[in-house]
Image (tube, grey):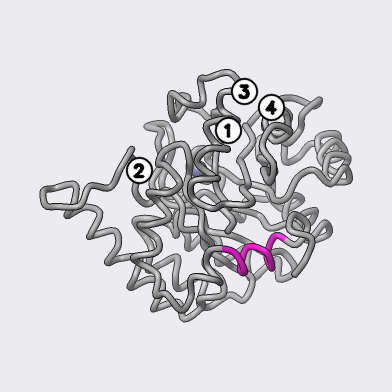
Amino acid sequence: MIDVHVHVVPPNLPGVGSLSGTLRLRPDAVANALKQDMKAAGIKQAFAMGEWNCGDEDPLGVRRTLQIAELVPGLQAIGVCDPKRGDDPEHFRCVEEELKRGRVVALKCYLGYLHFEPAHPNYRRYYELAARYKLPVVFHTGDTYSPEAKLKYAHPLGVDEVAVDHPHARFVLAHVGNPWMLDAAEVVYKNLNVWADLSGLVVGDSIEPGSGDDHDAVNDVATRLRAAFRYAERPNRFLFGTDWPLIPIPVYREFVRNVIPEKYHDQVFGDNARLLFRAAAGGV
Ligand SMILES: [Zn+2]
């Protein structure tokens, strides 16, 4: 099984704190916590988001993630795009050097947190590089953790435009665009080069069975996800991800298992990710 969306360092975005107390721990403690959760959930590979705005020495913000990855077998890094530097040729020279090293399995664009829509010209070069190096581009879509974010940039519909304009690039809608899951499902349905990851739809230490407002909220999300998954008619393009450490991986695995029909579990929990992240998984 593969978890395509975890964090081992804070994302360093405007208005966002450390996300979780776990990410304030020392690197070896973060590594141990993740290893434990991966083992408990039967996860063999996980892909972790880097951090934004780390300077020319670390143009995709993966240095600290790669250090932790050395301590966690199966952990690989996702580089973070910086649209504020999207008109700087020197930046892209550094980015391409990093991609050539082959240590990055995807690129991430923090829509909403950074006030650039997917079709902004400053993202274009990233999509071209992603296509050339056969790396997917993951977009944060949907609700954010920052009062400084602007939601209009984070709506999944914005990705339709770049999916059409960059047919050789492959795109992932993180969080199925929650709460705009049906919109995200339409973008997945209509474009052959768009996937969705299931991460971050529920957070917390546990998902308590029983009744009450929390339980109703989890049921609401499950109902909307089930409908979106069915609507998209693309079981081959949904990816298991958690947003760890915002929720324990075993807890989230059970949530997804209960929502996604069993006949699609092999695809959603691993096969789809192996096909999409070929550079990371060594092909299928
Ligand atoms: Zn995340």
Q: Name which residue type carries label 2.
A: Val
Residue bearing mark 3:
27
Q: Main secondary structure of the magenta part?
A: helix
Question: Is mark 3 in CB contact (under 8 Å) with mark 1?
Answer: no
Picture quadrant of residue 55: top right
Question: Is mark 2 in CB contact (under 8 Å) with mark 1?
Answer: no
| Quarter the N terminus occupies | bottom right
Disc number at residue 203? 2
Secondary structure under the numbered disc 4 in the rendered image? helix
Q: Residues within 10 Å of mark 4 (few under 14, many from 20)?
A: some
Pick the front one: 241 or 251: 251
Distance (Cα) linking label 2 and label 1: 16 Å
Picture layout, residue 217 above or below residue 87: below
Distance (Cα) linking label 2 and label 3: 22 Å
Mark toward the start of the polypeptide (3 vs 1): 1
Mark toward the start of the polypeptide (4 vs 1): 1
Pick the front one: 156 or 226: 226
Q: Magenta stretch: give its range.
A: 270-277
Secondary structure under the numbered disc 1 in the rendered image? loop
Q: Residues within 10 Å of mark 3 (few under 14, many from 20)?
A: some
Taking the spot 67% from the left edge, 30% from the top edge, the residue there is 68
Q: Name which residue type carries label 1.
A: Val
Residue bearing mark 1:
8
Q: Name which residue type carries label 3.
A: Pro
Question: Is mark 4 in CB contact (under 8 Å) with mark 3?
Answer: yes
Taking the spot 57% from the left edge, 66% from the top edge, the residue there is 195
Give the percent coordinates (x, y) of residue 75.
67, 43
For residue 135, side relative to residue 255 (left or right): right
